Amino acid sequence: MLQQKGGTWAQELPTVLWSFRTIPNPITGETPFSLVYGSNALLLVEIHADTARVTYYDELANEQGLRLNLGLLERKRAIVVDKMAKYKKKWGLVTYELETLEGREVPRSWNAFHLRKYYV
């Protein structure tokens, strides 16, 4: 399906998604990857450049570290939820979740600035 649309964006999509998943969110300070897996992703640049992280890799120590990170992951997620809740309070007064007349939910929040009164 992506190839039918044409252009080079379909070829760049995996790279863009990878960068989105590995760059920290400015609000939460965490990457989506770290919130899912409990650790930072190993970047391709690190693998090819023989960084210290790759050179001194120890499978046993890595396994222990992953288990420790999984224990801390729930706490990290709770902190992120708290941070996001603070922002939601600021945005909560001016955003709306909409649905169609048939009752289907419209896929995103809408800012009150973009809405107009409509009488049925």
Image (cartoon, grey):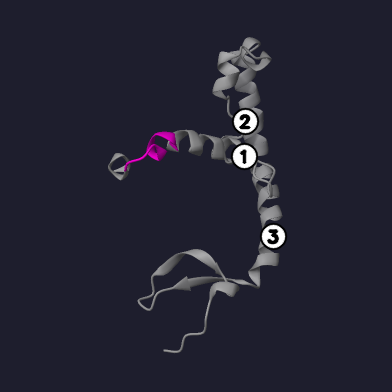
Amino acid residing under circle 2:
Asn
Q: Is residue 73 above or below residue 84?
A: above
Q: Nearer the viewer, residue 21 or 6?
A: 6
Location of the N terminus (image quadrant): top left
> Relative to 26, is 107 on the left or the right?
left
**x and y percent of residue 29 in the render?**
70, 43
Spatial CA distance of label 2 from label 1 is: 8 Å
Query: Which labelled disc corresponds to residue 87?
Result: 3
Quick one: label 3, few (<14), some, or many (20+) residues within 10 Å?
A: few
Tell me which amino acid carries mark 1. Answer: Thr
The magenta region covers 6-12
Given contact means CB atoms under 8 Å apart, are the residues at marks 2 and 1 in contact? yes
Q: Give the labeled residue for mark 1.
A: 31
Q: Position of residue 63 (x, y in %)?
A: 60, 21
Report the Cα–Cα distance between label 3 and label 2. Answer: 25 Å
- The residue pinned by badge 2 equals 40
The quadrant of the rendering that contains the C terminus is bottom left
| Labels 3 and 2: the sequence-earlier one | 2
